[in-house]
Amino acid sequence: MKKILSVLTALVAIAGTAQAQKNGYTVKVNFSEPINDKYVYLAHYFGKGLPTIYKTDSAQVQNGTSATFQHKDSILGGIYVVMYKERGAFFQLLLDNGYDVEATVGADHRAHFAKNDINKDFEAHETFMVGQAAKRKALQDEASKAKTKADTTKLQEKYEKLSQEDKAYRRKYFGSHPKSLLTQIFRAMDAPDIDKKKHYLADGKTVDSMYALNNYKAHFWDNFDFTDNRLAKTPILDGRLNEYFSQLVYPVPDTINMEMDKLLKKAEPAQEVYKYILHWLGNYTAESKMMGVDASFVHLVENYFGKGKAYWLDTAGVNRYLDRAAKIAPNVLGNPAPDVTLQDLTTLQDESIRSGNSPYTLLIFWSPQCGHCMEEMPKIIELYNKDLKKYGVRVVSVPTDGDRSELLKFNADNKITEWKTLVDAKNKLEYKPLYDVYSTPKIYLLDKDKKLVGKSLSSGTILKVVEFEEEKKARAAKKS
């Protein structure tokens, strides 16, 4: 008897393993209205929403009314897209290994699922959200008629109620379907509730005005499973990363670096999630318009891209990151400004770009051939005469081209007598890589020790940085 039971147990285990290991999918699509396509296509997301999708399969259309996608090899599950009508129409579905899905597409391009319970649940959520969208549209119409503050407050309460209904729907689902792919997606979308209670600082009297924001940030990723690669095949990750780093992370390199390292560490078990996060962070830090964030790009290159952790890049791809970081690294904020010897426009005598003793040095690389430069320079001249001079700012103007006579005339016409104008008369071009002068204007601010305290400045931001540095000095003086 024991032997028979052992055999039965083994057979059940084998059957269960076979079921768990079933790969691929079958997706049959029926069109209630015939289409003219010869083929329809299956695509997947990678972290980002439409129109950024990647074609992965195709199926021949039979009699204009049906098509079947079949795949036997293992796939990475997620949210997939079926495209038809020459890719001008589409619907979404959930797909994972072993899924057998049948959908009928109506004239409204919405899919109705006859097989696969998880996609029926996905359809039910879509139907719910269509209803929610109609309610939001009605609120927009109300907003156009709002006349008083009370009207606006009521509308805000109604919007908040809809958001809470969205959350409640999804949370109810993942409470009752803990192991579902749809639950993983709903959890990945889930934002923390905002704590509206009063909280106090350590003294027990002062209201902590930052508590709600800090608490929201602390719990932002609570429900996101960084170990589930399937979440990379959804359009969710891009938006969540953007909200976190653009709205919740203080934009200074040390803080950004710490937050990047934490997320990448969490994602290490899931290659595809890790890949998307590192790719996204590389773009974010390289392209950010916020001053100093490029130092975090250098951090990523030194600790990830340059150490073989961007496993999907070939040597040429890695070298592009290394080259860009090499250009940024010399002029990262807080570093000493690179020393370059140029020539005085008037005397043609050698002079260091860092020469002179002043509380601040404004270093301007510009070109008389650059339209934007010629818009900025008059504004900077006015700013200098009106505000910068009183802070002891010394201006070093470095025109990157132009005839000497033309530059002397520019100074005379604009009554520039207190600035130092330096030119690269020996055409060594040493300043270009050191100050990343591959476009103009490039404007830097140096402190009295010739450390970089501002970069990528404009006529609208120079004074703000000077005033910020003055406030820092005043706070330091009070502490001492």
Image (tube, rainbow, N blue to C red):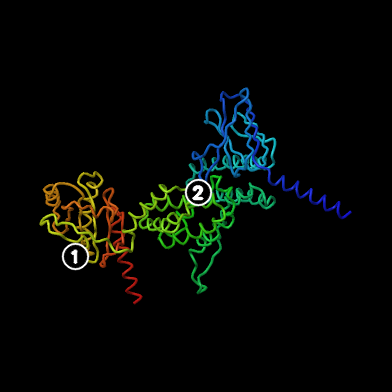
Kind of residue sitting beneath label 2: Gly
Q: Report if residue 316 is visible in the image.
A: yes
Q: Which mark is residue 33?
A: none
Residue 1 in the image: state x and y as whole percent: 89, 53
User: Going 25% across and 67% down the picture, which residue do you hit?
Assistant: 448
SS class, disc 1:
loop
Position of the C terminus, as image quadrant, is bottom left
How far apart are the two marked residues, 2 and 1, measured between alpha carbons?
47 Å
Dot 1 surroundings within 10 Å: few (below 14), some, or many (20 or more)? some
Q: Is residue 286 left or right of residue 414?
A: right
**Residue ranking furthest to the right:** 1
Q: Report if residue 287 is visible in the image.
A: no
Q: State the residue in front, 367 or 475.
A: 367
Kind of residue sitting beneath label 1: Gly
Q: Is residue 127 left or right of residue 284?
A: right
User: Going 15% across and 55% down the picture, which residue do you hit?
Assistant: 416
Residue with the mark numbered 1: 356
Q: Is residue 3 left or right of residue 264?
A: right
Q: Which mark is residue 239?
A: 2
